[in-house]
Amino acid sequence: MRVLGIETSCDETGVAVYDSETGLLAHQLHSQAALHAEYGGVVPELASRDHVRKLIPLLHQVLSDAGLDRRGGIDGIAYTAGPGLVGALLVGAAVGRSLAFAWGVPSVAVHHMEGHLLAPMLEPDAPEFPFLALLVSGGHTQLVAVDGVGVYRVLGESLDDAAGEAFDKTATLLGLPYPGGPELAALAEHGDPNRFRFPRPMTDRPGLDFSFSGLKTFAMNTIADAPGDPQTRAAIARAFEEAVVDTLVIKCRRALEHTGLERLVVSGGVGANRRLRQSMGVLADKLSVAVHYPRIEFCTDNGAMVAYAGCQRLLAGADEPLAFDARARWPLESLLPPGAEHGPQ
Ligand code: KG4
Ligand code: ZN
């Protein structure tokens, strides 16, 4: 089955074609980062309008890259239906559902976080089920026990800011351009690791939930009390990054020990962080656990993960009615395995 995947939940327009037999045929991404940079964050209305501008040209490009005819060669369409910005989601949903109608093929609404969670399945060393997933993006921080596609148990999540959000907000405090996560990580590379120490929130009590908003406040106070020279800013970035990474590693360790799971998946934008990958590697060695990531470009939002996740449901016979839906919120645990449900109710 050949599936066209469409991602428009936030500020990236992603399109891909995934073939269940031969794998990923083509993928394209347009990032709106430059558009939102002057506002210091995503402006929902601008995001929707830019998806409208970019989605059809990207679709043409991907079909041509995949060597497919505009009308033929696609057996099903998968589009992100939530969670995310509703106006942005509606662009992908409307285009995806309409194309499916025009081409006479089934379509399926994909949960954005299921896309992230299954993204490592696109790699040659795809993990087997069951596994523990650490989903760390700009909107979510979750630890999920995954027994199979659509069989998810959320073991812990952030009670306030997501890890990526904390990176972005702290980056703004440090005067870095949006989106700040990768910029902060780059600055931290030159930072003295011994100059500042940030707390590891919620690691001194049992449980698997996270809280990152206090780190941002801690960063704000540290920045206010310290000189503004480049070395100091780099040292603050370093201390912040280490605190987030340590916290994520401590909770992953706890979840792995608690569940006895032997495979760990780390996915979502913050999964691209070099120091996080390094520290997870050390943990994985210590616990004799295998750790899997998507390739760096598929850690952040993309159409390939949506095509893959949708394909699993389309293979099981998913086919929606003509009405479609977009959801700002959509609990991951409400999903069912392929064949048992066909998108948001
Ligand atoms: O998964 P994603 O593209 O979008 C959401 O679904 O939210 O994640 C984007 C987030 C942003 O907060 C961005 O700053 C963060 O991932 N991010 C990073 C890195 N690359 C992206 N954070 C830390 N280090 C990185 N290298
Ligand atoms: Zn995402």
Image (spheres, grey):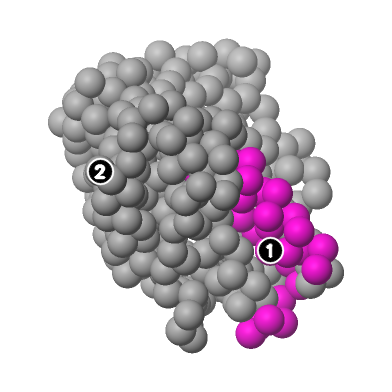
Q: Distance between the residues labelled 2 and 1?
A: 38 Å
Q: Residue 21: x, y in percent?
A: 75, 41
Instruction: Please give the label number shown on residue 343.
Output: none
Amino acid carrying mark 2 in the image: Ala
Left or right: residue 57 compared with residue 73: left
Q: Mark 2 or 1 closer to N-term?
A: 2
User: Is the residue under label 1 in contact with that under label 2 (CB below 8 Å)?
Assistant: no
Q: Residue 266: x, y in percent?
A: 61, 55
Residue 76: tell me if it is visible.
no
**What residue sits 57% from the left and 61% below the top?**
246
Residue 228: tell me if it is visible.
yes
Left or right: residue 328 compared with residue 2: left
In-front residue for pair 177/150: 177
Q: Which residue lies furthest to the left in this view?
A: 45
Q: Quadrant of residue 333?
A: bottom left
Instruction: Please give the label number shown on residue 264.
Output: 1
Which range is magenta?
A: 257-286
